[in-house]
Image (tube, rainbow, N blue to C red):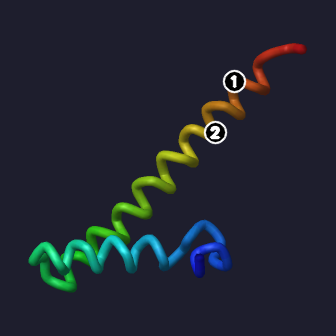
Amino acid sequence: MLAIIFPGGIGVREAVLTGFMIMLGITEEQAGTISIISRLWFTLGEAAIFLSAFVVGKSIKL
């Protein structure tokens, strides 16, 4: 429920993902790095999808 107050779940998702990876035996440094890279990867993917839709939308004449 606390995740509602954070825009985009920034920090919450990373903390949960890091915690689960630490429970699985991954070091804190590795888990933190993986969770941050995961956030960047998903953000870049969402940006690419948005830009693609924007370009296609601009090329369609309504």
Q: Amino acid at mark 1?
A: Val
The picture places residue 32, in percent across and down from the top left corner, at 29, 79
Whether residue 55 is situated above or below residue 43 in the rendered picture: above
Label 2: how many residues lie within 10 Å, few (<14), some (14-19) or many (20+)? few
- Is residue 34 shown left or right of residue 8? left
Q: Quadrant of residue 37?
A: bottom left
Q: Quadrant of the C terminus?
A: top right
Return the residue found at the far right. Answer: 62
Q: Say whether residue 12 is left or right of residue 41.
A: right
* Crowd around label 1: few <14 · some 14–19 · many ≥20 (10 Å): few
- Residue appearing at x 65%, y 72% in the figure: 7
Q: What's under tag 2, amino acid-wise? A: Leu
Q: Which residue is mark 1?
A: 56
Which residue ends up furthest to the left in the rendered image? 25
Q: In the image as oriented, which residue stretches furthest toward the top? A: 61
Residue 43, x across and y down, in percent: 50, 56
The quadrant the N terminus occupies is bottom right
Q: Quadrant of residue 8?
A: bottom right
- The structure residue drawn at horizontal position 63% and vertical position 41%, both measured from the top left corner, is 50
Taking 51 as reference, is 16 above or below it? below
Tell me residue 23's x, y (percent): 17, 78
Labels 2 and 1: the sequence-earlier one: 2
Residue 55, placed above or below residue 36: above
Seen from the viewer's position, the closer of residues 37 and 12 is: 12
Separation of marks 2 and 1 at Cα, in angstroms: 9 Å
**Labels in figure, total:** 2
Which numbered marker is on residue 51? 2
- In terms of secondary structure, where does tag 1 sit? helix
